[in-house]
Structures are given as structure tokens and as C-alpha cells.
Amino acid sequence: MSLSQVEAQSVTWQSDRNVLKNLKPFLMHILQFICGLILPLLVLCIWEIAARRQWLPEQILPAPQLVWSTSLELWQSGDLQSNFIISSKRIIYSVLLGSTIGLTLGIWFALSKSAQQYILPSIQLLTRFPIIGWIPLLMIFLGIDEALKIVAISLAVISPVLIATFKGIQHVPQHLLEVASVYQFSKWQTFNKVILPASLPAVISGLRQGIMQAWLALVFVELLASSEGIGYLMVWGRQLMQMDIIYMGIILIGLTGFFLDSILAAIERFTRFYSTRTRGV
């Protein structure tokens, strides 16, 4: 074998190796996706077998096909979309309100020593109360209308956003603040160009937790006091003894939560990459 042939084979081998190296992350994502489907498919198979062999009465455990056909009927009638949109609006309004309050308080506590000493302990005490503990008091002042739902869900968002913002700003590397001091940045420039980019991943992480808490609180509030929304559909199914509607609601809640968390996780990874690049610069 000549030297040129050896060099050609070496180049081909190196090219194939680079292709495999570039494909490795993609193949790993596919493998993770396939592994993630194993448990849901296994549960679905067990569910189908249990329904066919009538391990439980049909009134308690309806067949997957019945749940699917019920979902299609609710979709065609427009009930599923309208209730889902109502729940989505509640989430949006609550997250906007709760995250605004959480961000504001988190920044204030992180930048003000006096606020940390005199006000933060009281806020931490209040955030320890579960949402269910606030419902009776909120009903007295707000009734059972839309304001109750928005405020109750917002309370679930405030705590994780506040804590994540506070800790994110507190853990900004000291050398970055020293560089800002050397360049004689103003307080606004220091916050905008140093503190905000460095703490952004922590803030997004807190917002991610807040949105997931809001989604869980939404279902609870709608189950408790609502005449519209996904939670109300489940209550309606219970009143009619139609378990297929309840199972449909459970699956829809789970899928929506999964997709929400996946999107927020991707945003969080991007912000961490952005923060790393900013620190490197």
C-alpha cells in the first residue's frame, strides 16, 4: 500500500470519526427520548390489559379508547378548547402578577441590607404557608370569583421567584463587581451589565419553578371553586360519574406540565450559556 493510499484512508477515517462525534449529541437525545417513552407506554399497556380483563369496574377504570373518544367529543364540541384557554389565561395573569412581585422583592432584598434585616424574615414566614391555607381568608375578602383564583395562584409563584432572584444576585461573583468598580460603573450600569446577566440563570430557574407551582395551584383552585377550566371539567366528570373525563383531565394536565417544563428548561439552558459567555467577555 502506497503512502498516498494510507493518507487517504487516514483522512477518510478521521472524517468518519468527526461525523460520529457530531452525531453523538443527537443520538443521545434520541436515546433519552426513547427511554422516556418506556414508562408511559408500559403504563398504557397495563391500563389496556386491566380494562380488557376488567380488573376494576368500567365505572372506575374506563378503557383508553373510551378516554380518547371522550377527548375527541369534547374537542369537537369546543368544550375542551374553551376550558383550556380559560385555564391558560389564569396561568398567564397569575404568573405575570406573581413574578413581578417576586422579582421586585427579590431585587430589593438583595440590594438593601435594611430590607434583608427587617422585612425579609416576615416575608419568608408568610411564604411557608401552603396555598390551601390562604384560600379561606382570600374567600372572605375576594369572594369566589376570578380574583380569588388569580391571587391564589400568584401566591404560589411569588416564593420561588423571590428566593431565586435574591440568591442569584447574592451569588454574583465578587470579581465581576470589582471589575465594574474599576471601570467606575454607575449603580444602574453595574446592575444592567453585571448583576442582571450573572443572575439571569437563577432568575429563570426560579421562574420555571414558579410556573410549575402555578400550574399545580391552578388545578387545585379550579377543583375547589370554579365553574370553568380544566379542573372544573374534572369536577363535572365526577358529578356525572364519568371517569373518562377525569382521566382525560389528568392526562391533559400532565402533558401540559411536561411541555411547559421542557420549554422552560430549554430557556434556562440558553440563559446559562448566555451568562457564561457574558462572564467570559
Image (cartoon, rainbow, N blue to C red):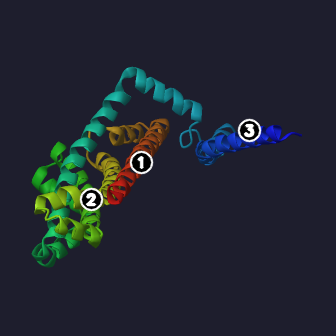
Q: Secondary structure at mark 1?
A: helix
Q: Amino acid at mark 2?
A: Val
Give the left or right position of residue 223, taking residue 39 as reference.
left
Residue receiving disc 2: 161
Residue receiving disc 1: 261
Q: Residue at x 20, y 69 (%)?
A: 126
Q: Residues within 10 Å of mark 1 (few under 14, many from 20)?
A: some
Residue receiving disc 3: 12
Can I make out residue 233 in this image?
Answer: yes
Q: Amino acid at mark 1?
A: Asp
Q: Residues within 10 Å of mark 3 (few under 14, many from 20)?
A: few
Give the CA distance from mark 3 to mark 2: 52 Å
Q: Quadrant of the C terminus?
A: bottom left
Q: Nearer the viewer, residue 98 or 219?
A: 98
Image spot of residue 229 (x, y percent): 31, 38
Q: Nearer the viewer, residue 182 or 139?
A: 182
Q: Residue at x 25, y 51 (%)?
A: 153
Would you place residue 185 above or below residue 100 in this image? Answer: below
Q: Nearer the viewer, residue 143 or 259?
A: 259
Image spot of residue 114 (x, y percent): 10, 76
Give the CA distance from mark 1 to mark 3: 42 Å
Can I make out residue 135 in this image?
Answer: no
Q: Nearer the viewer, residue 213 or 43?
A: 213
Image spot of residue 269 (x, y percent): 41, 51
Q: Earlier in the sequence, mark 2 or mark 1?
A: 2
